[in-house]
Amino acid sequence: MNPFTADPDALVQLVAGLRAAAPLARDPVPVADPVFMSLRRDGRGIWSDWYEGGDFAEALDQGLDWHEPGAADVLEVCLTRNYRDISPDRFKTAFADPFRGRRGIEISSRAGLRRQSPSQTIATNRPLARDLAMYLEEFGLDEKAFRRRGGAIRAFAGRQLLFFLDEPMRCIELYRGNRIVEPAAVGAPTIRNLVDGMAGWTLANTASDGRLTYEYWPSQGAESDADNTIRRFMATVAMLRAARVLGRSDLLDAADRNLCDNLERFYVEVDGVGGIAWDGSIKLGAMATAALAILEHPDGARHEAMREKLSAGIDFLWRRNGAFRTFLRPETRNDNQDSYPGQALLYWAHLHGETRDAVLRDRCMKSCRYYRDRHLANRNPAFVPWHSQACAMLYEQTGETDLRDWVFEMNDWLVPMQQWGAPLAPDLWGRFVDPRRPKFGPSHASATGAFLAGLADALKLARYAGDATRAALYERAVWRAVRSLRQLQFVDAVDTFYARQRERVLGGLRTETYDNRIRVDNVQHGLIGLLKLPDVLGFSFGNGRS
Protein backbone atom coordinates (compact mmCIF):
# COMPACT_ATOMS: atom_id res chain seq x y z
CA MET A 1 0.00 0.00 0.00
CA ASN A 2 1.28 3.47 -0.90
CA PRO A 3 -0.05 5.89 1.74
CA PHE A 4 0.28 8.79 -0.68
CA THR A 5 -2.23 7.20 -3.06
CA ALA A 6 -4.34 5.04 -0.74
CA ASP A 7 -7.91 6.17 -0.16
CA PRO A 8 -8.99 6.99 3.41
CA ASP A 9 -10.93 3.72 3.76
CA ALA A 10 -7.77 1.73 3.02
CA LEU A 11 -5.89 3.73 5.64
CA VAL A 12 -8.64 3.03 8.17
CA GLN A 13 -8.21 -0.66 7.44
CA LEU A 14 -4.47 -0.30 7.99
CA VAL A 15 -4.98 1.35 11.39
CA ALA A 16 -7.65 -1.17 12.35
CA GLY A 17 -5.29 -3.97 11.37
CA LEU A 18 -2.51 -2.51 13.47
CA ARG A 19 -4.83 -2.45 16.44
CA ALA A 20 -5.77 -6.08 16.01
CA ALA A 21 -2.64 -7.78 14.67
CA ALA A 22 0.50 -8.92 16.41
CA PRO A 23 3.51 -6.75 15.51
CA LEU A 24 5.06 -9.39 13.26
CA ALA A 25 1.83 -10.11 11.37
CA ARG A 26 1.75 -6.90 9.32
CA ASP A 27 3.42 -5.95 6.06
CA PRO A 28 5.61 -2.83 5.97
CA VAL A 29 4.25 0.31 4.30
CA PRO A 30 7.35 2.26 3.23
CA VAL A 31 7.56 6.06 3.28
CA ALA A 32 10.68 7.97 2.31
CA ASP A 33 10.04 11.23 4.17
CA PRO A 34 9.12 12.24 7.72
CA VAL A 35 5.60 11.75 9.10
CA PHE A 36 4.03 14.09 11.65
CA MET A 37 1.55 12.64 14.17
CA SER A 38 -0.48 14.25 16.91
CA LEU A 39 -3.09 12.92 19.33
CA ARG A 40 -5.83 15.22 20.60
CA ARG A 41 -8.71 15.08 23.01
CA ASP A 42 -11.47 17.68 22.70
CA GLY A 43 -9.17 19.81 20.57
CA ARG A 44 -6.28 19.85 23.02
CA GLY A 45 -2.99 18.28 21.93
CA ILE A 46 -1.79 15.55 24.29
CA TRP A 47 1.08 14.05 22.27
CA SER A 48 2.92 14.73 19.03
CA ASP A 49 6.05 13.49 17.32
CA TRP A 50 7.87 13.27 14.02
CA TYR A 51 8.69 9.86 12.57
CA GLU A 52 11.71 10.24 10.33
CA GLY A 53 10.69 7.88 7.54
CA GLY A 54 10.74 4.15 6.89
CA ASP A 55 7.64 2.10 7.66
CA PHE A 56 4.41 4.12 7.82
CA ALA A 57 2.73 1.26 9.66
CA GLU A 58 5.47 1.47 12.28
CA ALA A 59 4.87 5.21 12.59
CA LEU A 60 1.19 4.58 13.21
CA ASP A 61 2.12 1.83 15.67
CA GLN A 62 4.15 4.42 17.57
CA GLY A 63 1.20 6.77 17.85
CA LEU A 64 -1.32 4.05 18.66
CA ASP A 65 0.95 2.46 21.26
CA TRP A 66 0.99 5.75 23.11
CA HIS A 67 -2.77 6.02 22.83
CA GLU A 68 -4.83 4.52 25.64
CA PRO A 69 -8.53 3.95 24.97
CA GLY A 70 -10.39 7.16 25.73
CA ALA A 71 -7.24 9.26 26.13
CA ALA A 72 -7.53 10.75 22.63
CA ASP A 73 -10.37 11.11 20.16
CA VAL A 74 -8.39 11.99 17.01
CA LEU A 75 -5.06 11.09 15.49
CA GLU A 76 -3.73 13.76 13.15
CA VAL A 77 -1.24 12.53 10.54
CA CYS A 78 0.70 14.47 7.93
CA LEU A 79 2.70 12.52 5.34
CA THR A 80 5.35 14.86 3.96
CA ARG A 81 7.09 14.92 0.58
CA ASN A 82 8.60 17.16 -2.10
CA TYR A 83 11.21 18.83 0.10
CA ARG A 84 13.01 21.70 -1.61
CA ASP A 85 15.55 24.30 -0.52
CA ILE A 86 14.38 27.89 -0.14
CA SER A 87 16.95 30.63 -0.56
CA PRO A 88 16.72 33.76 1.66
CA ASP A 89 15.64 35.92 -1.26
CA ARG A 90 12.69 33.60 -1.95
CA PHE A 91 11.55 33.17 1.65
CA LYS A 92 8.69 35.72 1.61
CA THR A 93 7.34 34.40 -1.67
CA ALA A 94 7.65 30.72 -0.78
CA PHE A 95 5.96 31.14 2.59
CA ALA A 96 3.38 33.82 1.75
CA ASP A 97 -0.05 33.62 3.38
CA PRO A 98 -1.77 31.67 0.54
CA PHE A 99 0.64 28.79 1.26
CA ARG A 100 -0.25 28.58 4.94
CA GLY A 101 -1.81 25.20 5.56
CA ARG A 102 -0.64 23.84 2.21
CA ARG A 103 3.12 24.06 2.67
CA GLY A 104 5.27 23.06 5.63
CA ILE A 105 8.58 24.53 6.75
CA GLU A 106 11.77 22.82 7.92
CA ILE A 107 14.47 24.92 9.58
CA SER A 108 17.84 23.41 10.43
CA SER A 109 21.31 24.45 11.52
CA ARG A 110 23.97 23.05 13.81
CA ALA A 111 21.81 24.41 16.65
CA GLY A 112 18.95 22.02 15.87
CA LEU A 113 16.10 21.08 13.54
CA ARG A 114 12.45 22.14 13.64
CA ARG A 115 9.52 21.39 11.33
CA GLN A 116 5.98 22.66 11.13
CA SER A 117 3.55 20.55 9.13
CA PRO A 118 0.86 22.22 6.99
CA SER A 119 -1.91 20.99 9.26
CA GLN A 120 -0.09 22.31 12.34
CA THR A 121 0.22 25.71 10.69
CA ILE A 122 -3.58 25.78 10.58
CA ALA A 123 -3.99 24.36 14.09
CA THR A 124 -1.66 26.96 15.61
CA ASN A 125 -2.79 29.77 13.25
CA ARG A 126 0.83 30.78 12.90
CA PRO A 127 2.27 32.42 9.78
CA LEU A 128 5.19 30.45 8.39
CA ALA A 129 7.50 33.44 8.79
CA ARG A 130 6.79 33.31 12.51
CA ASP A 131 8.25 29.78 12.68
CA LEU A 132 11.61 31.13 11.53
CA ALA A 133 11.44 33.96 14.06
CA MET A 134 10.65 31.47 16.85
CA TYR A 135 13.55 29.24 15.79
CA LEU A 136 15.99 32.14 15.91
CA GLU A 137 14.63 33.26 19.30
CA GLU A 138 14.87 29.74 20.74
CA PHE A 139 18.52 29.33 19.83
CA GLY A 140 19.57 32.95 20.34
CA LEU A 141 20.50 33.50 16.70
CA ASP A 142 20.20 36.36 14.29
CA GLU A 143 20.03 35.75 10.55
CA LYS A 144 23.80 36.11 10.07
CA ALA A 145 24.57 33.68 12.91
CA PHE A 146 21.95 31.29 11.49
CA ARG A 147 23.76 31.24 8.13
CA ARG A 148 27.19 30.89 9.80
CA ARG A 149 25.94 27.80 11.61
CA GLY A 150 24.90 26.10 8.38
CA GLY A 151 21.31 27.33 8.44
CA ALA A 152 19.00 25.91 5.82
CA ILE A 153 15.29 26.27 5.15
CA ARG A 154 13.18 23.83 3.18
CA ALA A 155 9.55 23.86 2.11
CA PHE A 156 7.56 20.67 1.76
CA ALA A 157 4.11 19.44 0.85
CA GLY A 158 1.99 17.14 2.96
CA ARG A 159 -0.98 14.83 2.81
CA GLN A 160 -3.20 15.70 5.78
CA LEU A 161 -5.22 12.92 7.41
CA LEU A 162 -7.49 12.97 10.44
CA PHE A 163 -8.37 9.63 12.08
CA PHE A 164 -11.34 9.59 14.45
CA LEU A 165 -10.47 6.91 16.98
CA ASP A 166 -13.93 6.07 18.27
CA GLU A 167 -15.95 3.22 16.78
CA PRO A 168 -16.47 2.92 13.94
CA MET A 169 -13.12 4.47 13.11
CA ARG A 170 -13.04 6.80 10.13
CA CYS A 171 -10.41 8.79 8.26
CA ILE A 172 -10.99 12.19 6.67
CA GLU A 173 -8.52 13.65 4.21
CA LEU A 174 -8.05 17.36 4.82
CA TYR A 175 -7.15 20.26 2.60
CA ARG A 176 -5.63 23.09 4.60
CA GLY A 177 -7.07 21.57 7.78
CA ASN A 178 -10.57 21.48 6.27
CA ARG A 179 -12.54 20.05 3.36
CA ILE A 180 -13.32 21.67 0.04
CA VAL A 181 -16.87 22.92 -0.48
CA GLU A 182 -17.63 21.79 -4.01
CA PRO A 183 -19.33 24.53 -6.07
CA ALA A 184 -21.81 22.06 -7.55
CA ALA A 185 -23.06 21.22 -4.06
CA VAL A 186 -23.97 24.83 -3.19
CA GLY A 187 -27.69 25.61 -3.18
CA ALA A 188 -30.53 26.81 -0.98
CA PRO A 189 -29.73 24.20 1.72
CA THR A 190 -26.21 25.67 1.91
CA ILE A 191 -27.68 29.09 2.65
CA ARG A 192 -30.01 27.65 5.30
CA ASN A 193 -27.11 25.80 6.95
CA LEU A 194 -24.92 28.88 6.85
CA VAL A 195 -27.60 31.01 8.50
CA ASP A 196 -28.43 28.38 11.12
CA GLY A 197 -24.75 28.09 12.01
CA MET A 198 -24.25 31.84 12.20
CA ALA A 199 -27.32 32.23 14.39
CA GLY A 200 -26.01 29.46 16.63
CA TRP A 201 -22.60 31.12 16.90
CA THR A 202 -24.23 34.42 17.81
CA LEU A 203 -26.28 32.85 20.60
CA ALA A 204 -23.33 30.86 21.94
CA ASN A 205 -21.20 34.01 22.08
CA THR A 206 -23.74 36.40 23.62
CA ALA A 207 -23.32 36.52 27.39
CA SER A 208 -26.21 36.84 29.81
CA ASP A 209 -25.48 40.57 30.14
CA GLY A 210 -25.67 40.98 26.37
CA ARG A 211 -21.99 41.31 25.60
CA LEU A 212 -21.10 39.65 22.29
CA THR A 213 -17.64 38.24 21.60
CA TYR A 214 -15.77 40.66 19.36
CA GLU A 215 -12.87 38.43 18.27
CA TYR A 216 -12.05 34.85 19.23
CA TRP A 217 -8.91 32.81 18.62
CA PRO A 218 -9.86 29.13 18.19
CA SER A 219 -6.26 27.93 18.39
CA GLN A 220 -5.75 29.51 21.81
CA GLY A 221 -9.27 29.19 23.14
CA ALA A 222 -9.16 32.87 24.06
CA GLU A 223 -10.68 36.23 23.17
CA SER A 224 -8.79 39.15 21.72
CA ASP A 225 -8.85 42.46 23.57
CA ALA A 226 -9.46 44.36 20.30
CA ASP A 227 -12.77 46.15 19.76
CA ASN A 228 -14.74 48.21 17.24
CA THR A 229 -18.06 49.89 17.96
CA ILE A 230 -19.24 49.98 14.34
CA ARG A 231 -18.95 46.22 14.08
CA ARG A 232 -20.60 45.74 17.46
CA PHE A 233 -23.73 47.70 16.52
CA MET A 234 -23.87 46.20 13.04
CA ALA A 235 -23.87 42.79 14.74
CA THR A 236 -26.93 43.96 16.69
CA VAL A 237 -28.60 44.86 13.39
CA ALA A 238 -27.77 41.40 12.00
CA MET A 239 -29.24 39.71 15.08
CA LEU A 240 -32.43 41.77 14.87
CA ARG A 241 -32.87 40.94 11.18
CA ALA A 242 -32.21 37.26 11.76
CA ALA A 243 -34.79 37.24 14.56
CA ARG A 244 -37.35 38.86 12.27
CA VAL A 245 -36.71 36.78 9.14
CA LEU A 246 -36.37 33.46 10.97
CA GLY A 247 -39.13 34.21 13.48
CA ARG A 248 -36.88 33.37 16.45
CA SER A 249 -37.56 34.83 19.86
CA ASP A 250 -34.22 33.59 21.23
CA LEU A 251 -32.36 35.74 18.72
CA LEU A 252 -34.56 38.72 19.48
CA ASP A 253 -33.88 38.34 23.20
CA ALA A 254 -30.13 38.13 22.55
CA ALA A 255 -30.27 41.16 20.24
CA ASP A 256 -32.18 43.15 22.85
CA ARG A 257 -29.67 42.35 25.57
CA ASN A 258 -26.82 43.11 23.17
CA LEU A 259 -28.24 46.49 22.17
CA CYS A 260 -28.74 47.49 25.80
CA ASP A 261 -25.18 46.45 26.64
CA ASN A 262 -23.71 48.33 23.69
CA LEU A 263 -25.62 51.52 24.49
CA GLU A 264 -24.72 51.34 28.16
CA ARG A 265 -21.03 50.97 27.39
CA PHE A 266 -20.57 53.27 24.40
CA TYR A 267 -23.33 55.92 24.20
CA VAL A 268 -22.32 59.47 25.18
CA GLU A 269 -23.61 62.97 24.64
CA VAL A 270 -21.33 65.76 23.44
CA ASP A 271 -22.48 69.35 22.95
CA GLY A 272 -26.12 68.31 22.90
CA VAL A 273 -25.82 65.47 20.35
CA GLY A 274 -25.42 61.74 20.75
CA GLY A 275 -22.27 59.80 19.97
CA ILE A 276 -20.75 56.34 20.29
CA ALA A 277 -17.38 56.65 21.99
CA TRP A 278 -14.51 54.21 22.20
CA ASP A 279 -10.75 54.57 22.45
CA GLY A 280 -10.85 58.36 22.27
CA SER A 281 -12.94 58.66 19.11
CA ILE A 282 -16.58 59.13 18.10
CA LYS A 283 -17.11 57.85 14.57
CA LEU A 284 -19.88 58.70 12.15
CA GLY A 285 -20.15 55.03 11.20
CA ALA A 286 -20.70 53.95 14.81
CA MET A 287 -23.32 56.65 15.36
CA ALA A 288 -25.19 55.55 12.22
CA THR A 289 -25.12 51.81 12.97
CA ALA A 290 -26.24 52.41 16.56
CA ALA A 291 -29.13 54.56 15.36
CA LEU A 292 -30.03 51.92 12.77
CA ALA A 293 -30.08 49.20 15.44
CA ILE A 294 -32.50 51.23 17.56
CA LEU A 295 -34.66 52.01 14.52
CA GLU A 296 -34.92 48.33 13.57
CA HIS A 297 -35.65 47.07 17.08
CA PRO A 298 -39.36 46.20 17.39
CA ASP A 299 -39.33 47.85 20.82
CA GLY A 300 -36.84 50.56 19.96
CA ALA A 301 -39.08 53.22 21.45
CA ARG A 302 -37.34 52.52 24.79
CA HIS A 303 -34.19 54.04 23.28
CA GLU A 304 -35.85 56.68 21.12
CA ALA A 305 -34.28 59.62 22.96
CA MET A 306 -30.82 58.20 22.25
CA ARG A 307 -31.67 57.59 18.59
CA GLU A 308 -32.87 61.17 18.16
CA LYS A 309 -29.66 62.47 19.73
CA LEU A 310 -27.60 60.21 17.45
CA SER A 311 -29.59 61.49 14.46
CA ALA A 312 -28.83 65.02 15.55
CA GLY A 313 -25.15 64.14 15.67
CA ILE A 314 -25.27 62.71 12.14
CA ASP A 315 -27.06 65.85 10.95
CA PHE A 316 -24.34 67.95 12.57
CA LEU A 317 -21.65 66.09 10.63
CA TRP A 318 -23.43 66.58 7.27
CA ARG A 319 -22.32 69.38 4.95
CA ARG A 320 -24.44 71.32 2.45
CA ASN A 321 -22.42 69.97 -0.50
CA GLY A 322 -23.48 66.44 0.47
CA ALA A 323 -20.26 65.43 2.23
CA PHE A 324 -20.03 64.10 5.78
CA ARG A 325 -17.38 64.82 8.33
CA THR A 326 -16.54 61.35 9.55
CA PHE A 327 -15.55 61.97 13.18
CA LEU A 328 -17.35 63.89 15.89
CA ARG A 329 -14.22 63.39 18.01
CA PRO A 330 -11.46 64.14 17.34
CA GLU A 331 -12.67 67.05 15.27
CA THR A 332 -9.51 67.04 13.17
CA ARG A 333 -10.12 63.57 11.70
CA ASN A 334 -12.02 63.16 8.45
CA ASP A 335 -10.77 59.83 7.08
CA ASN A 336 -12.67 56.60 6.31
CA GLN A 337 -14.66 58.45 3.68
CA ASP A 338 -15.16 55.21 1.73
CA SER A 339 -17.26 53.53 4.42
CA TYR A 340 -18.61 55.81 7.17
CA PRO A 341 -20.71 58.09 4.90
CA GLY A 342 -22.22 55.01 3.25
CA GLN A 343 -23.21 53.70 6.67
CA ALA A 344 -24.80 57.05 7.47
CA LEU A 345 -26.65 57.03 4.15
CA LEU A 346 -27.90 53.52 4.86
CA TYR A 347 -29.36 54.71 8.16
CA TRP A 348 -30.92 57.72 6.43
CA ALA A 349 -32.43 55.47 3.76
CA HIS A 350 -34.09 53.35 6.45
CA LEU A 351 -35.22 56.47 8.29
CA HIS A 352 -36.64 57.97 5.09
CA GLY A 353 -38.56 54.76 4.53
CA GLU A 354 -40.22 55.37 7.90
CA THR A 355 -40.78 59.13 7.69
CA ARG A 356 -40.82 60.06 3.95
CA ASP A 357 -39.40 63.38 5.10
CA ALA A 358 -38.76 65.67 2.11
CA VAL A 359 -35.79 67.44 3.69
CA LEU A 360 -34.13 64.11 4.50
CA ARG A 361 -34.82 62.91 0.96
CA ASP A 362 -33.07 65.95 -0.52
CA ARG A 363 -30.08 65.46 1.76
CA CYS A 364 -29.84 61.80 0.75
CA MET A 365 -29.91 62.67 -2.95
CA LYS A 366 -27.28 65.38 -2.55
CA SER A 367 -24.99 62.98 -0.65
CA CYS A 368 -25.50 60.18 -3.17
CA ARG A 369 -24.40 62.50 -5.97
CA TYR A 370 -21.47 63.92 -4.01
CA TYR A 371 -20.11 60.49 -3.12
CA ARG A 372 -20.70 59.13 -6.61
CA ASP A 373 -18.35 61.79 -7.98
CA ARG A 374 -15.85 61.15 -5.21
CA HIS A 375 -15.85 57.41 -5.81
CA LEU A 376 -15.43 57.74 -9.57
CA ALA A 377 -12.37 59.91 -8.95
CA ASN A 378 -10.77 57.45 -6.49
CA ARG A 379 -12.46 54.09 -6.45
CA ASN A 380 -12.29 51.65 -3.55
CA PRO A 381 -14.29 48.42 -3.09
CA ALA A 382 -15.02 49.29 0.56
CA PHE A 383 -17.34 52.01 -0.75
CA VAL A 384 -19.53 49.70 -2.83
CA PRO A 385 -21.63 47.61 -0.41
CA TRP A 386 -22.78 50.50 1.79
CA HIS A 387 -23.73 52.82 -1.04
CA SER A 388 -25.28 49.94 -3.01
CA GLN A 389 -27.63 49.12 -0.14
CA ALA A 390 -28.47 52.75 0.59
CA CYS A 391 -29.05 53.71 -3.05
CA ALA A 392 -31.09 50.57 -3.76
CA MET A 393 -33.38 51.38 -0.85
CA LEU A 394 -33.69 55.02 -1.86
CA TYR A 395 -34.49 54.00 -5.43
CA GLU A 396 -37.33 51.79 -4.22
CA GLN A 397 -38.66 54.75 -2.21
CA THR A 398 -38.23 57.47 -4.82
CA GLY A 399 -38.12 55.82 -8.25
CA GLU A 400 -35.05 57.91 -9.17
CA THR A 401 -33.52 55.73 -11.90
CA ASP A 402 -30.08 57.31 -11.61
CA LEU A 403 -29.84 55.69 -8.17
CA ARG A 404 -30.58 52.26 -9.67
CA ASP A 405 -28.09 52.82 -12.48
CA TRP A 406 -25.43 53.86 -9.97
CA VAL A 407 -25.97 50.62 -8.07
CA PHE A 408 -25.40 48.78 -11.35
CA GLU A 409 -22.27 50.76 -12.16
CA MET A 410 -20.73 50.14 -8.73
CA ASN A 411 -21.35 46.41 -8.81
CA ASP A 412 -20.32 46.00 -12.45
CA TRP A 413 -16.96 47.39 -11.35
CA LEU A 414 -16.78 45.17 -8.25
CA VAL A 415 -17.69 41.77 -9.70
CA PRO A 416 -14.47 41.24 -11.73
CA MET A 417 -12.54 41.31 -8.43
CA GLN A 418 -14.20 38.07 -7.37
CA GLN A 419 -11.68 35.27 -7.81
CA TRP A 420 -12.73 31.98 -9.36
CA GLY A 421 -11.14 28.92 -10.90
CA ALA A 422 -7.71 27.36 -11.29
CA PRO A 423 -4.84 27.93 -10.72
CA LEU A 424 -6.21 29.55 -7.55
CA ALA A 425 -6.36 27.12 -4.63
CA PRO A 426 -9.86 25.60 -4.64
CA ASP A 427 -10.73 26.73 -1.11
CA LEU A 428 -10.18 30.38 -2.10
CA TRP A 429 -12.75 30.48 -4.89
CA GLY A 430 -15.43 33.14 -4.48
CA ARG A 431 -13.52 35.65 -2.40
CA PHE A 432 -12.97 39.26 -3.48
CA VAL A 433 -9.41 40.50 -3.90
CA ASP A 434 -7.48 42.33 -6.60
CA PRO A 435 -3.79 41.27 -6.54
CA ARG A 436 -2.98 44.01 -9.06
CA ARG A 437 -4.15 46.69 -6.63
CA PRO A 438 -2.91 45.71 -3.15
CA LYS A 439 -4.04 49.08 -1.77
CA PHE A 440 -7.56 47.61 -1.76
CA GLY A 441 -6.43 45.25 0.99
CA PRO A 442 -6.36 41.48 1.50
CA SER A 443 -9.31 39.15 1.24
CA HIS A 444 -11.48 38.87 4.35
CA ALA A 445 -14.65 37.04 5.32
CA SER A 446 -16.25 40.30 6.41
CA ALA A 447 -15.57 41.88 3.01
CA THR A 448 -17.13 38.95 1.15
CA GLY A 449 -20.18 39.17 3.40
CA ALA A 450 -20.54 42.92 2.92
CA PHE A 451 -20.20 42.61 -0.87
CA LEU A 452 -22.84 39.87 -0.81
CA ALA A 453 -25.30 42.24 0.89
CA GLY A 454 -24.82 44.85 -1.83
CA LEU A 455 -24.92 42.29 -4.64
CA ALA A 456 -28.21 40.87 -3.35
CA ASP A 457 -29.77 44.32 -3.69
CA ALA A 458 -28.20 44.83 -7.12
CA LEU A 459 -29.59 41.47 -8.26
CA LYS A 460 -33.07 42.44 -7.08
CA LEU A 461 -32.91 45.72 -9.00
CA ALA A 462 -31.60 44.05 -12.16
CA ARG A 463 -34.47 41.58 -12.16
CA TYR A 464 -36.99 44.34 -11.52
CA ALA A 465 -35.53 46.29 -14.45
CA GLY A 466 -35.71 43.25 -16.74
CA ASP A 467 -31.92 43.36 -17.22
CA ALA A 468 -31.33 39.63 -17.71
CA THR A 469 -27.63 39.98 -18.49
CA ARG A 470 -26.85 41.87 -15.29
CA ALA A 471 -29.13 39.64 -13.26
CA ALA A 472 -27.21 36.57 -14.45
CA LEU A 473 -23.88 38.25 -13.66
CA TYR A 474 -24.94 39.24 -10.16
CA GLU A 475 -26.60 35.90 -9.40
CA ARG A 476 -23.44 34.04 -10.32
CA ALA A 477 -21.42 36.35 -8.06
CA VAL A 478 -23.93 35.78 -5.24
CA TRP A 479 -23.66 31.99 -5.45
CA ARG A 480 -19.88 32.17 -5.59
CA ALA A 481 -19.84 34.38 -2.50
CA VAL A 482 -22.11 31.90 -0.72
CA ARG A 483 -19.64 29.13 -1.55
CA SER A 484 -16.79 31.23 -0.15
CA LEU A 485 -18.63 31.93 3.11
CA ARG A 486 -19.53 28.27 3.55
CA GLN A 487 -15.86 27.36 3.01
CA LEU A 488 -14.94 29.75 5.81
CA GLN A 489 -17.55 28.49 8.29
CA PHE A 490 -16.64 26.10 11.11
CA VAL A 491 -19.16 23.29 10.68
CA ASP A 492 -18.27 20.14 12.65
CA ALA A 493 -15.68 18.07 14.52
CA VAL A 494 -13.50 17.79 11.42
CA ASP A 495 -12.57 21.42 10.85
CA THR A 496 -12.60 22.14 14.61
CA PHE A 497 -10.25 19.25 15.44
CA TYR A 498 -7.84 21.70 17.15
CA ALA A 499 -10.47 23.97 18.80
CA ARG A 500 -10.51 23.75 22.59
CA GLN A 501 -13.96 25.31 23.02
CA ARG A 502 -15.93 24.09 20.02
CA GLU A 503 -19.19 25.56 21.27
CA ARG A 504 -17.67 29.04 20.81
CA VAL A 505 -16.37 28.21 17.34
CA LEU A 506 -19.07 26.23 15.52
CA GLY A 507 -21.04 28.36 13.08
CA GLY A 508 -18.46 31.14 13.13
CA LEU A 509 -16.46 32.17 10.08
CA ARG A 510 -12.72 32.21 9.76
CA THR A 511 -11.13 35.44 8.57
CA GLU A 512 -9.54 33.47 5.71
CA THR A 513 -9.03 29.81 4.93
CA TYR A 514 -5.51 30.13 6.39
CA ASP A 515 -6.41 32.47 9.27
CA ASN A 516 -8.87 30.95 11.74
CA ARG A 517 -9.60 34.06 13.82
CA ILE A 518 -13.35 34.64 14.20
CA ARG A 519 -14.24 38.32 14.30
CA VAL A 520 -17.82 39.41 14.83
CA ASP A 521 -18.05 41.13 11.45
CA ASN A 522 -17.02 37.89 9.73
CA VAL A 523 -20.44 36.66 10.83
CA GLN A 524 -22.63 39.78 10.81
CA HIS A 525 -21.97 40.98 7.25
CA GLY A 526 -22.51 37.57 5.73
CA LEU A 527 -25.63 37.03 7.81
CA ILE A 528 -27.15 40.33 6.64
CA GLY A 529 -26.47 39.38 3.02
CA LEU A 530 -27.71 35.82 3.33
CA LEU A 531 -30.97 36.91 4.95
CA LYS A 532 -31.80 38.84 1.74
CA LEU A 533 -31.38 35.83 -0.54
CA PRO A 534 -34.73 34.05 -0.15
CA ASP A 535 -36.40 37.16 -1.55
CA VAL A 536 -34.13 37.35 -4.60
CA LEU A 537 -33.48 33.63 -5.21
CA GLY A 538 -36.99 32.36 -4.53
CA PHE A 539 -36.75 29.99 -1.59
CA SER A 540 -37.81 29.93 2.05
CA PHE A 541 -35.97 29.49 5.33
CA GLY A 542 -38.69 27.03 6.24
CA ASN A 543 -40.69 29.07 8.71
CA GLY A 544 -43.33 30.29 6.28
CA ARG A 545 -41.39 33.46 5.44
CA SER A 546 -39.56 34.09 2.20
Image (tube, rainbow, N blue to C red):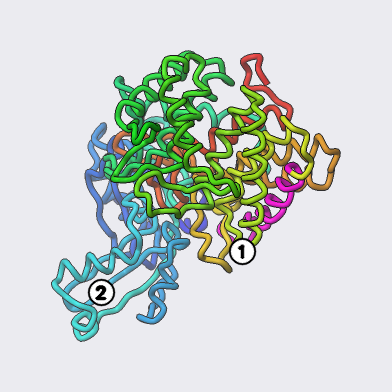
Which residue is at the front of the view, 412 or 91? 412
Q: Given this view, does label 2 or label 1 mark the residue nearer the observer? A: 1
Give the labeled residue for mark 1: 423
Residue 132, quarter of the rendered image: bottom left
Which residue is at the front of the view, 168 or 295? 295
Earlier in the chain: of badge 2 and badge 1, it is 2
Q: Residues within 10 Å of mark 2 (few under 14, many from 20)?
A: some
Residue 354: in sight, yes or no? yes
Residue 347 vertical placement versus 75 (above, below) = above
> Could you tell me the amino acid type at mark 2?
Ser
Residue 124 vertical placement versus 273 (above, below) = below
Residue 508 placed where, x, y %? 44, 36
Residue 383 vertical placement versus 190 (above, below) = below
Residue 58 placed where, x, y %? 31, 55
The structure residue drawn at horizontal position 29% and vertical position 44%, both measured from the top left corner, is 279
Mark-to-mark CA distance, 2 and 1: 31 Å
Principal secondary structure, stretch drawn in magenta: helix
Q: Residues within 10 Å of mark 1 (few under 14, many from 20)?
A: few
Residue 414 among magenta residues: yes
Indicate which disc residue 108 carries. 2
Residue 263 placed where, x, y %? 35, 27
Give the magenta-colored segment's residue range: 403-426
For the C terminus, which image quadrant?
top right
Residue 8 among magenta residues: no
